[in-house]
Image (cartoon, grey):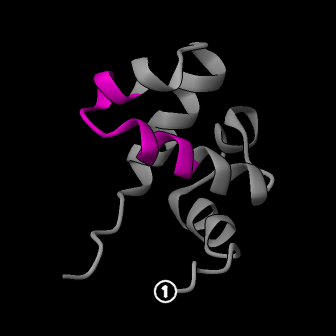
Amino acid sequence: MPQQRMDICMIKDILRLKYSGGLSHEAIARTLSISKGVVTKYLGLAGAAGLDWEATVGRTLTTTSRSTSTVPPREK
């Protein structure tokens, strides 16, 4: 079964809770009802793309999704 894509708003919520709220990965996972591994994965991808909360605050969804799509997909 193919992996489900995460909504860009969810990624922005993860960044907001981590960098603006200062929450731990575990607290973010509980808040958003996702696994701690998913939080770690998306924070890592955002970091590799040079994104943090300050960089994403003023961005539109199109600009943000273009920035995160520059990270190459993981090989199977």
The structure residue drawn at horizontal position 41% and vertical position 36%, both measured from the top left corner, is 36
Q: Position of residue 27 (x, y in %)?
A: 41, 17
Quadrant containing the N terminus in the rendered view: bottom left
Disc 1: CA contacts within 10 A as few (<14), some (14-19) or many (>=20): few
Task: Report the residue that reaches farthest toward the left.
Answer: 1
Q: Mark 1 points at which residue?
A: 76
From this view, report whether residue 49 is shown above or below residue 76. above
The structure residue drawn at horizontal position 50% and vertical position 26%, both measured from the top left corner, is 25
Which residue corresponds to the image point at 61% horizontal and 44% vertical from the top-left? 43
Which amino acid does the dot numbered 1 rest on?
Lys
Count all numbered tags in the image, as a single digit: 1
Q: Is the residue 48 above or below the residue 25 in the image?
A: below
How far across and how far down the image is residue 30, in percent? Answer: 30, 23
Magenta-highlighted stretch: main secondary structure? helix
Residue occupying image coordinates x 81% and y 53% = 50
Residue 64: x percent and y percent?
Answer: 61, 59
* Image position, residue 65 (x, y; %): 56, 66
**Position of 72 compared to 76: left or right?**
right
Q: What stretch is highlighted in magenta?
A: 29-42
Q: In which quarter of the image is residue 69?
A: bottom right
- The residue nearer to you, when weighing 18 against 64, is 18
Q: Residue 39 in magenta?
A: yes
